[in-house]
């Protein structure tokens, strides 16, 4: 009852199940009444290691006793080590650490505009996005998102985003040009329904971006 009354202190931005989770272990979680649930997502999105794995708990506990938070004005050894691990094991040369998917998309959009401005001039700022896509809940990322339901009530949208239907190479060709700074694609749309984009469309996007000097 006390827990229920505290719910009104949180902004009503997500529709949540009427369940308060208090504990987790592996792929199981328990609510405040002791009811056990199987968590098929074992977390959510990138948090897919399950709940309270002993190695994760040990690492967090150990670091909490050494150094918790410093600003980006300084280097820290764990950050350098994770960045190196990521660049050694992925396509990327450099890492940008941030706090959410929306923030990573904001970073990507700013990077695309900066790249367009520096290499192809100030009119090169447009990002071509797909209808049905989802890219986050900040102003720029709802403008990139190809679902009006996320934009309604927050207009006017930031400009510079155009949307084409997924898998329409013709629409992508028509929308692209000197203004195109980047093409933004979820290879498998998630929030828009589990909808994969075709290989042909991805290859066409690669070819168009390479030809224009745009980012993909
Ligand atoms: C493809 C995609 N991009 C961005 C986001 C936004 O991530 P976050 O909720 O961490 O801001 C999501 C979240 O579902 C997503 O599915």
Image (cartoon, helix red, strand yellow):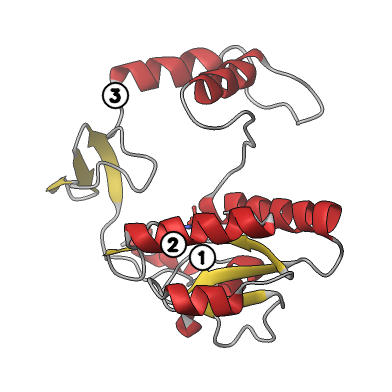
Residue at 57%, 32% (x, y): give it: 92
Disc 2: which residue:
6
Label 2: state its secondary structure. Answer: helix
Marks 3 and 2: CB-CB under 8 Å?
no
Tell me the quadrant of the picture where the N terminus can be found: bottom left
Q: Is residue 41 above or below residue 159?
A: above
Q: Is residue 163 above or below residue 216?
A: below
Q: Report whether 119 appears left or right of 171.
A: right
Residue at 62%, 36% (x, y): give it: 97
Q: Is residue 89 visible?
A: yes
Answer with the quarter of the image where residue 179 lies.
Answer: bottom right
Find the distance from the CA under tag 1 to the CA under tag 2: 6 Å
Percent across and percent down for residue 5 are 40, 66
Q: Is mark 3 within 8 Å of ligand 1?
A: no
Marks 1 and 2: CB-CB under 8 Å?
yes
Residue 81 is marked as none
Disc 3: which residue:
53
Q: Residues within 10 Å of mark 1 (few under 14, many from 20)?
A: few
Choose between 147 and 211: the one closer to the eye: 211
Earlier sequence position, callout 3 versus callout 2: 2
Q: Report whether 208 appears left or right of 46.
A: right
Percent across and percent down for residue 70 are 72, 26
């Amino acid at each position: 009852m006390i827990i229920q009354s505290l719910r009104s202190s949180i902004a009503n931005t997500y529709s949540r199940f009427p369940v308060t989770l208090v504990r987790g272990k592996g792929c199981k979680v328990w609510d405040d009444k002791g009811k056990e649930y199987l968590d098929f997502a074992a977390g959510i999105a990138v948090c897919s290691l399950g709940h309270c794995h002993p190695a994760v708990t040990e690492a967090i506990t150990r670091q909490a006793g050494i150094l918790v938070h410093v600003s980006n004005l300084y280097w820290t050894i764990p950050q350098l080590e994770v960045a190196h691990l990521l660049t050694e094991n992925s396509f990327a040369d450099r890492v940008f650490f941030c706090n959410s998917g929306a923030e990573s998309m904001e970073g990507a959009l700013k990077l695309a505009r900066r790249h367009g401005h520096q290499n192809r001039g100030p009119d090169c700022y447009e990002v071509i996005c797909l209808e049905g896509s989802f890219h986050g809940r900040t102003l720029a990322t709802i403008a990139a998102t190809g679902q009006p339901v996320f934009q309604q009530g927050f207009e006017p949208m930031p400009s510079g985003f155009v949307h084409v239907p997924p898998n329409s190479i013709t629409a992508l060709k028509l929308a692209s040009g000197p203004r195109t700074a980047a093409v933004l694609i979820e290879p498998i749309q998630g929030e828009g329904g589990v909808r994969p984009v075709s290989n042909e469309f991805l290859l066409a996007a690669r070819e168009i971006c390479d030809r224009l000097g745009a980012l993909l």
